Amino acid sequence: MFKSLRSRLILNALLPMLIILPAIGILTTYLLETQVFLANLTNEITRQAVLVADTAASYIEIWQDPVRAQEFVSRISPGLTAKLMLLDPAGRLIVSSDPADSFLVGQIFNVPDADMLMTQEMPAEVNVNEKKITDISVPVFNNRGELIGFVRLANPLANIYGRSQNLRRVLVAVLAGGLLLGIGLSWILGRQVEKPLRQTTQAAFHLANGDQPTALELSGPQETRMLQSAFNTLLDRLQTLETSRKRLLANLVHELGRPLGALRSASQALLGGAVNDPQLSRELLEGIDDELVRLQGLLNELAHLHEQVLGSLDMRIQSVEIRAWFNSLLPTWQRLAADKRITWKNQLADDLPECAEFDPDRMAQVLANLFSNAIRYTPPGGTIEVRLETSGDRLKFSVQDSGSGIQPEESQQVFEPFKRGQAAQRLPEGMGLGLSIARDLVQAHGGNLVLENPGQHGSLLVVYLPLKQPATEA
C-alpha cells in the first residue's frame, strides 16, 4: 500500500550513494590507468624495444640497405604490440612497420642522446606526453660500441588516449547531468511528501493545543492523502463527540431540573400543611415517586454510559423464573400508562418455560427503557401491547405502541448514543441514550434488539434473548 512513499524514501536514501559511488569509480579508474596500466604498458614496450635492439645489432646490413631493413621489420613486427621504426644515428627514418609511414622515410625524428643513456645506464628513453606513452627509443650499437641507429617503438594506443579522454569527458558530463536530474527529481518528490506531511503535523499540533483546525485538503501522493483523510475523519469524530458532550450537558440540566423542581414543590407543599390532607398527601407522594422513578432511570442511563466509556460491563447471570420476574416489572409502568390514559395490554404465551438464564436487573433495565419510550411517544387514548413468548431457543419480548412510529431512514440511527428520531425531537425529555443502552445490554446477553416495522404507524421493538447462556459468560 505504501509502495510509492517507500520508493521516494529509498530514492532519497540512495541519492548520496548515487553521488559517492560514481566518484569512487572515476577515481579508481584514474588510479588504475596511471599507476597500473601505464606502468605495465611502459615495461612491456620497453622490454620489446630492447629485445628488438639487441637483435638488430646483430644485423649490420639492415642499417645500410633499406631493402634488408624492410625484410627485418616485416619479420619482427608481427610479434610486437607496437609500431616498429628503424632510425639512423641522425634520427632519419629508414623503415617503418606501418605502410602508411612510407612518405615519412627520410624524415628526422627526435632521438635521445645515446651517450647520456649509457652514462645513466638506461637502456631506453620513454617519451610521455600528458601522462600518455607516445614512443620508446633504444640506441643500437655495433660490436665496436659505435652508434649505428635507433629502434623506435610507437605506442599503438597513443591515438586512443585522446578518444578515451573525450569519452571520459562525455561520461562525466552525462553523470553530472544525471546527478543534477536525480537531485531535482528527489527535491520535487521530497516536496510532494514534505508539504502535506507538514500541514498534517501542524494541524495535529493545533488540535492537541485545543485549537479548532479546519479539514485538510487532500494533496500529495496516495499515502499522504490517506493520512489526511484519516485526520479529517478524526476531526469529524472529535467534533461529533464535542457536540454530543454539549447535548448531554444540556439534556442533563433539563432532565435533572424538571424532576428536582417537582420534588421541591411537593416537599414545600407537604411542609406547608398538605400533609394534613390525606388525599393531597397521597397525590403528592405518588408524584414524588414518579419523579424518583425518572431520576432512577436517568441514573441508570448515566451509569451505563460510564460503563461504555470504561469498556466494562458487570453481568450476574442466574436462573430466573420468567413469569414472576416479568409480572413484577409491570405495575409501575401500567400505572404511568393509566395516568396518561393509555391502554396497556399484556400477552404471555402459555408455553413459556419456567426459567431462563440472564441478569434480571440488566434485563429489567432493558424493558424499562422500552416501556418508558412507549409511554412517552404514545398519545393519550393510544395502546401499548406487551408480548412475551418463545422463538425457537430464545425468549421474545415485544413492545408495540400506537405512537407516530420511526421512519425507515432512522431505523439504525435511533440505536446510536445521543441520536433521536424526528418524533423524539418534538419532545424535550430524554438524552437519546435509552435504546443504545438497551441494545448494548441485550447484546451482552448474546441476544439482539431490533426494530421490526419501521415506517408503519407505531413502533414495534423486539428483544431476542437466549434461554441459556454459555458457561463462560455465566
Image: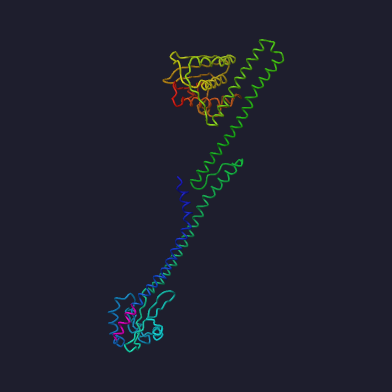
What x and y, as percent, mark residue 140? 34, 84
**In-image side of 363 versus 64 (left or right):** right
Observer-nearest of 126 and 105:
126
Q: Is residue 126 above or below residue 373?
A: below
Give the answer, above or below, for where 146 lies relative to 46.
below
The residue lying at 59 percent from left, 22 percent from top is: 296
Q: For the magenta stretch, what is the residue range?
A: 48-59
Query: Relative to 354, does residue 24 appear above or below in the rendering?
Result: below
* x, y percent for residue 370: 53, 21
Quadrant assignment, res 157: bottom left
181 displayed left or right of 138: right
Residue 51 lies in the magenta stretch: yes
Image location of residue 242, percent across then percent down? 59, 34
Which quarter of the rendering shows the N terminus?
top left
Q: Nearer the viewer, residue 393 or 121?
A: 121
The one nearer the camera, 356 or 172, is 356
- The answer to which quarter of the image holds residue 302 is top right
Examine the residues drawn in magenta and state their main secondary structure. Answer: helix
- Residue 92: x and y, percent? 36, 85
Give the total number of marks visible in the rendering.
0
Report if residue 12 lies within the magenta region.
no
For image coordinates 31% across by 76% down, the residue present is 80
Q: What colour scheme has been applied to the protein in the rendered image?
A: rainbow
In the image, farthest residue toward the right:
272
